Image (tube, rainbow, N blue to C red):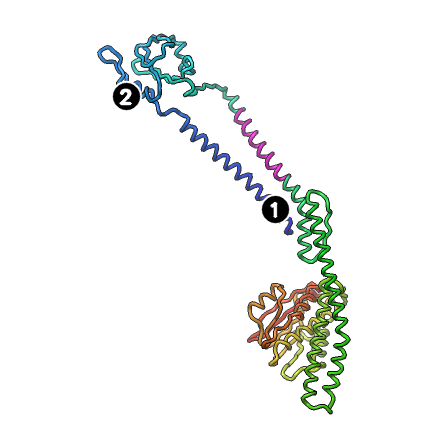
């Protein structure tokens, strides 16, 4: 799964989580609303049973005590007590417009609904009388509703169906919108990813994100122009330096070999020659790494014998004159074994030469350098190790993570440019191989390169 797909997968999952959270929150709010409504909506401040208990018959006369009168006053209510025949035998604050006698039909009606717009509460006493308490209009709501059970099932099922349909509709619309966003954003994300890897990708400048696509196209064109300008500048400077540098090398070599000159002058000429050779090598590395970075030089894949290439790299270093404090060895882990791969012989030779020169440059006190080749598991292995000063754990970690570092080691007060190792990693990458840096035992640096074997 590529990064674009992972991005939209997370987007879709977050959308689903939002929908589920929306449903849970709404269910919780509905539950709280029902609970709070049942608490605040029910009239619990007035209990007609309490009122009835405080209305008693004393000496043949129905009398309400102070508690009953206080309950009625607090609720601005009126009350009446009817006997079995519906005749009012006691009343308190009963409106003049209401009758003092009621039929059984009247009682059945106002017990369910209202008594002449007055919401009432009814309580049947044990002696057969009926206590009625009335309240001002629009203070209480009485509602009586009856449903057949089959219709109730249809109502509940329909409510569930409507809920599920709305859930499906919300999910469908959100996923459809996500799909539209994904369709519009995928080219943009792919373009950004391509630019981050140095590849150019032209985007269609149309649709909802046309301005963003146009901006990415302008950025790609600017990067291309900038890279081309830099590559042309490097090639031009390198070309201009080659001629005077060749003259410096030639004259320095002549002066170094001239026996008529004083020993000190010949020594200084040798220093000029060696530093000029380093400069020439740096220019060559700079040109080659620029060509590889911007694909200006094609990798010519041919059948290459890695063992033979290793011998050639060691021979060239020895033939060019290796100082006495260094020891350079070539080793075949399994002598006589065929180690062939598809690669560019010149680039591979340059890669091994750079690794050897890296050990020489960063160990001026001298060291032993071993170049070994082997084959295992369908891969050709090439290892360059030395017993020099080695690298710090931080630099090893940076190199293994593929980071560009300005310096691989510190040699006294001089800091090397590290271009040689950058070129090595580019050549390994061009051959679809891997490179790993580690410490040698007991000290030093080991660089192991794994390249795919020729099928």
**Residue 170 shown in magenta:** yes
Question: Disc 2 or disc 1, which is closer to the eye?
Answer: 2
Residue 244 place in picture, x, y as percent: 76, 76
Q: Does residue 32 show up magenta in the picture?
A: no
Closest to the observer, 370 or 134: 134
Relative to 157, residue 348 above or below = below
Q: Which mark is residue 67?
A: 2
* Residue 88 rendering spot, x and y as whole percentages: 33, 10
Answer few, some or many: residues within 10 Å of disc 2's Cα (few below 14, many 20 plus, some between 14 and 19).
Answer: some
Asked if 26 appears above or below 352 in the picture, the reply is: above
By secondary structure, the bulk of the magenta-drawn segment is best described as helix
Residue 152 on image: x %, y %: 51, 23
Q: Is residue 424 left or right of residue 27?
A: right
**Disc count in the image?**
2
Residue lying farthest to the bottom in this orientation: 260
Q: Is residue 390 above or below residue 193?
A: below
Is 72 situated left or right of 185 in this image?
left
Q: Which residues are magenta?
A: 155-176
Looking at the rendered structure, the secondary structure element under dot 1 is helix
User: Residue at the spot x=60%, y=37% of the render?
Assistant: 171
Does 94 sit left or right of 276 as displayed?
left
Whether residue 129 is visible here, answered yes or no, is no
State the residue position of label 1: 9
Residue 325 in view here = yes
């Amino acid at each position: 799964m590529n990064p674009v797909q992972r991005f939209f997968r997370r987007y879709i999952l977050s959308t689903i989580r939002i929908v589920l959270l929306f449903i849970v929150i709404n269910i919780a709010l509905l539950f709280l609303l029902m609970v709070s409504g049942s608490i605040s909506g029910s009239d619990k401040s007035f209990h007609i049973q309490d009122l009835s208990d405080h209305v008693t018959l004393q000496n043949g006369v129905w009398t309400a005590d102070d508690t009953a009168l206080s309950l009625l006053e607090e609720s601005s209510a009126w009350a009446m007590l009817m006997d079995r025949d519906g005749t009012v035998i006691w009343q308190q604050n009963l409106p003049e417009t209401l009758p003092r006698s009621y039929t059984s039909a009247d009682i059945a009606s106002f017990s369910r609904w209202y008594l002449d717009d007055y919401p009432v509460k009814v309580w049947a006493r044990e002696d057969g009388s009926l206590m009625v308490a009335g309240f001002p209009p629009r203070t209480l709501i009485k509602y009586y509703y009856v449903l057949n059970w089959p219709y109730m099932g249809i109502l509940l099922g329909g409510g569930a169906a409507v809920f599920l349909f709305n859930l499906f509709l919300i999910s469908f619309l959100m996923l459809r919108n996500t799909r539209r966003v994904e369709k519009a954003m995928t080219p943009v994300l792919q373009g950004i990813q391509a630019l981050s890897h140095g590849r150019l990708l032209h985007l269609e400048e149309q649709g909802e994100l046309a301005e963003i696509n146009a901006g990415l196209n302008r950025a790609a064109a600017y990067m291309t122009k900038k890279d081309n300008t830099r590559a042309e500048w490097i090639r031009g400077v390198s070309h201009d330096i080659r001629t005077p540098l060749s003259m410096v090398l030639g004259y320095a070599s002549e002066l170094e070999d001239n026996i008529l000159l004083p020993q000190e002058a010949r020594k200084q000429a040798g220093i000029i020659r060696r530093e000029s050779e380093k400069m020439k090598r740096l220019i060559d590395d700079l040109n080659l790494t620029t060509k590889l970075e911007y694909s200006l030089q094609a990798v010519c894949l041919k059948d290459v014998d890695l063992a033979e290439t290793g011998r050639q790299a060691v021979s060239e270093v020895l033939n060019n004159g290796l100082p006495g404090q260094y020891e350079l060895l070539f080793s075949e882990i399994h002598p006589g074994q065929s180690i062939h791969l598809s690669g560019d012989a010149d680039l591979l030779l340059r890669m091994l030469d750079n690794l050897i020169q890296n050990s020489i440059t960063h160990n001026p006190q001298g060291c032993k350098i071993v170049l070994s080749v082997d084959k295992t598991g369908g891969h050709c292995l090439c290892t360059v190790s030395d017993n020099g000063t080695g690298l710090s754990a931080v630099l090893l970690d940076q190199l293994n993570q593929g980071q560009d570092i300005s310096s691989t080691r510190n040699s006294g007060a001089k800091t090397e440019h590290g271009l040689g190792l950058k070129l090595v990693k580019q050549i390994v990458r061009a051959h679809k191989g891997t490179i790993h840096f580690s410490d040698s035992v007991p000290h030093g640096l080991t660089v192991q390169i794994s390249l795919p074997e020729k099928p």
